[in-house]
Image: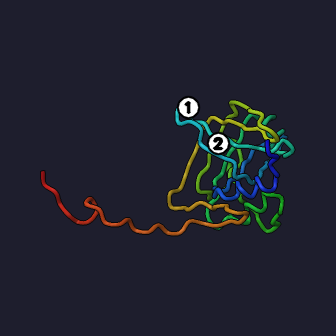
Amino acid sequence: MTAIDPRQLRDACGQFGTGVTVITTHCNEHDHGMTANAFMSISLNPPLVAISIARNARMLANIQQTGRFAVSILAEGMEDLAWHFAGKPKPYLCDFFERRDGLPVIADAAAIFVTELVEEILAGDHTIFLGRVREMSYDLSKKPLLFFRGKFGGLADPQPAPPTLENAGYEFIW
């Protein structure tokens, strides 16, 4: 078996563009947050989402202690918040949280999910947390902040669909 270089694996995974989230919880009378792009929908019924947290991240013990976490999908223009929660504090940022069911979430995010922890799965140097969605909201007018090859970006405005029989102005009578 060929050894996989961790840096090359990270670079290869960087070819997969993702959204950017801030994972939050409230523990020991303090709000805690971290930037992550390891988030996905797992199930619609029951409503489950997953996040992946490094075993050496401080957030891991906070989620284990509270049994709850929230996910805020950042919108375009929220790069400073992404950096702030990635360990590069921006002292001028303030009042970025609002409360949902007692948990901090990012105000004006593209979407938020408030969850209750239902399962932990050890996976290499990470722990995958499955959370049952208890509350959510989203704003379809907002585009997500994206992450690709180590840089933030956004979506281009969609191009109009090419004409089809359905949208070309024809009327069919059967």
User: Residue 53's image quarter?
Assistant: top right
Q: Give the residue pinned by disc 1.
A: 46
Q: Which residue is drawn at 74% across and 33% down?
A: 121
Task: Classify 152 as above or below 43.
Answer: below
| In this picture, residue 118 sits left or right of residue 138 | right
Q: Earlier in the sequence, mark 1 or mark 2?
A: 1
Task: Classify 133 as above or below 139.
Answer: above
User: Residue 1's image quarter?
Assistant: top right
Q: Is the C-beta separation of discs 1 and 2 under 8 Å? A: no
Task: Classify 71 as above or below 78.
Answer: above
**Amino acid at pointer 1:** Pro
Q: Which residue is drawn at 67% across and 62% down?
A: 148
Q: Which residue lies furthest to the left in this view?
A: 174
Q: Give the residue pinned by disc 2.
A: 114
Mark seen at residue 24: none
Q: Tag 1, which secondary structure?
A: loop
